[in-house]
Image (tube, coloured by chain):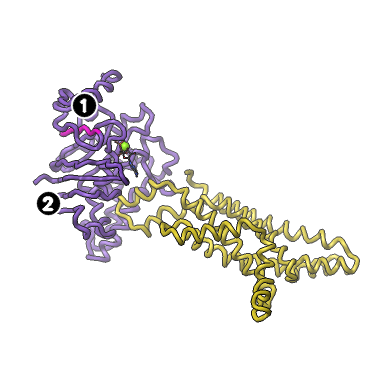
Chain colours: A purple, B yellow
């Protein structure tokens, strides 16, 4: 069984069926790129995986644990969902940083709240047994994450004083601060000026390692080709084609994939 | 009657205005919040009820509402029930009226927060209450300071309407002078309102500046 298993996801808004029986699996450390034209359901799929939307049907499991099962109402309780969300991280197209907190405060807000709760419950947060120890640990990790995304000197700035690219790098660090099993990106560079996309893509590229599993929805086809282990092309709520970047991007079989990619190739490369 | 003793007399009356102002704020600020939650409720009957209430209160004059609270109960109960204290009647009418206005300001502030702020909180494993208090609340406050200041400054001046149900406010005292043939204290009352509103303006500007540390 693969590390992340997503099976038979079906999601409708009213009468429109947006995801029609979507399924894929991902091994630990793999990067999945999802491409496809706008309206094909990519965002909705990521939102289902992060439990921001509840699919009508389907199963999501990580490391063998079933986190969601459309047929099991006990998996739909608020508290259960909140706990399961922590397996996933999400980086939004619009960053969604908290404007009233500094860069550093954005990183430590959620981990501190979680640490307080965990220590009260079972006296442990990632090896720390008191809240004070946990906060020290969280602060140290946040400093390291800032270094990783190259924003140490912006530690005490407010988001409004950062460029879009810097804000998105903060958002990535913020998601990483909770050590998610799978980190999802929804078009992380689509809201950026073209000259700022590179710095964000480089940060994502730098995260690739043996234990960081990532799903990246992107229109940056050459990025997908270079970084992804696996590529999915979505069209109208179904997976039209999937495989390695060589298979899907270099040598697509489906006419729809070919048509989609040829539109990109006109402009790039 | 010299200037200072007239000032002191008027100030006696102005105390009633200040009292009405303070109690109205104390009641209407929390009541407005409750009504705003009601008008955003997914439960349709509650939402319809709250929005109808707001529509009626904002759509009719405060002065008329004051008359309704004071004169209607004894009329329909044939004298069996009336609000004896005129100030109490004024307080009730003012709280209801201002709660309706405040609820719309709160609603605007809360609905103006982008959905993405909540979603960012959710994906970071935060609880609904944590998102409200740690993420959303300050942003809402920042958004509503300006419209709230306007409304609160209007309230200062509206307190003089209580004079119409014969609450003994500053205008009543001024009118007593007028009846004795002394007209200028009537106009002098303006200075009291001006001073009070001036102080409030300084206070609100201070709060706005405090919240100016971030944009967005
Ligand atoms: N909350 C919603 N309510 C109704 N329809 C929605 C909602 N979210 C998305 N959709 C519809 O689902 C389809 C897929 O949207 P989306 O997942 O955003 O696609 P993509 O990210 O690939 O552009 C679109 O037709 C969109 O209009
Ligand atoms: Mg999208």
Q: Quadrant of residue A17 in the image?
A: top left
Find residue B43 and report its horizontal and vertical position in percent: 41, 59
- Magenta extent: A230-235
* Horizontal side, residue B131 vs residue A41: left or right: right
Disc 2 within 8 angstroms of ligand 1 (CB): no
Q: Secondary structure at mark 1?
A: helix
Which percent across, then down, holds residue A139? Answer: 31, 51
Q: What type of secondary structure mainly makes up the magenta span?
A: strand
Write the residue at 20% across / 45% down: A9
Residue nearest the viewer, comparing A199 with B148: B148
Relative to B216, residue A65 above or below: below
Q: Can residue A137 be found in the magenta stretch?
A: no
Q: Nearer the viewer, residue B93 or B125?
A: B93
Residue to which mark 1 is pinned: A257
Task: Report the residue marked by disc 2.
Answer: A64
What's the residue at 29%, 38% (across, down)? A186
Q: Which of the 4 image quadrants contains residue B192? A: bottom right
Choose mark 2 or mark 1, whichever is in front.
1
Tell me the element at label 2: loop
Q: Residue furthest left?
A: A1
**Badge count:** 2
Q: Name the spot of residue B137 as percent of width and height, x first.
A: 45, 55
């Amino acid at each position: 069984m693969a590390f992340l298993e997503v099976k038979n996801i079906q999601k409708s808004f009213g009468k429109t069926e947006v995801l029609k029986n979507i399924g894929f699996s991902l091994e630990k450390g793999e990067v999945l790129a999802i491409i496809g034209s706008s309206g094909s359901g990519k965002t909705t799929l990521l939102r289902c995986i992060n439990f921001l939307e509840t699919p009508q049907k389907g199963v999501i499991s990580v490391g063998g644990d079933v986190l969601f099962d459309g047929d099991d109402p006990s998996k739909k309780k608020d508290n259960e969902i909140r706990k399961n969300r922590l397996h996933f991280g999400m980086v939004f197209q619009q960053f969604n940083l908290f404007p009233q907190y500094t860069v550093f405060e954005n990183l430590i807000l959620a981990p501190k709240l979680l640490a307080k709760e965990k220590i009260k419950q079972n006296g442990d947060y990632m090896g720390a047994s008191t809240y004070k120890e946990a906060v020290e640990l969280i602060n140290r990790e946040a400093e390291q994450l800032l270094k990783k995304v190259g924003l140490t000197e912006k530690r005490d700035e407010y988001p409004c004083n950062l460029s879009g690219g810097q804000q998105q790098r903060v958002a990535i660090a913020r998601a990483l601060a909770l050590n998610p099993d799978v980190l999802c990106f929804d078009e992380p560079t689509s809201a950026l000026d073209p000259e700022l996309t590179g710095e964000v893509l480089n940060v994502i590229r730098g995260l690739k390692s043996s234990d960081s599993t990532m799903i990246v929805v992107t229109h940056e086809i050459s990025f997908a080709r270079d970084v992804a282990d696996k590529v999915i092309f979505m069209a109208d709520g179904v997976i039209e084609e999937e495989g390695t970047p060589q298979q899907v991007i270099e040598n697509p079989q489906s006419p729809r994939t070919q048509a989609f990619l040829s539109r990109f190739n006109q402009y790039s490369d | 009657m010299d200037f200072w003793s007239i000032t002191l007399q008027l100030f006696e009356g102005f105390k009633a205005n200040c009292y009405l102002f303070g109690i109205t704020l104390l009641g209407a600020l929390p009541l407005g919040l409750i009504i705003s939650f009601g008008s955003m409720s997914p439960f349709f009957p509650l939402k319809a009820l709250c929005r109808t209430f707001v529509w009626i209160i904002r759509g009719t004059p405060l002065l008329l509402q004051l008359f309704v609270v004071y004169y209607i109960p004894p009329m329909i109960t044939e004298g069996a029930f009336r609000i004896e204290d005129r100030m109490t009647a004024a307080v009730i009418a003012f709280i209801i009226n201002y709660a309706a206005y405040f609820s719309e300001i709160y609603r605007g502030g809360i609905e103006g927060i982008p959905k993405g702020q909540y979603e960012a909180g959710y994906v970071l494993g935060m609880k609904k209450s944590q998102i409200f208090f740690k993420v959303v609340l300050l942003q809402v406050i920042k958004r509503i300071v300006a419209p709230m200041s306007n409304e609160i400054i209007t309230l200062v001046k509206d307190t003089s309407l209580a004079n119409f149900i014969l609450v003994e406010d500053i205008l009543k005292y001024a009118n007593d002078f007028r009846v004795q043939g002394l007209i200028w204290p009537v106009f002098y009352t303006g200075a009291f309102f001006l001073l009070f509103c001036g102080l409030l303006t300084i206070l609100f500007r201070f709060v706005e500046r405090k919240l100016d540390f971030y944009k967005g």
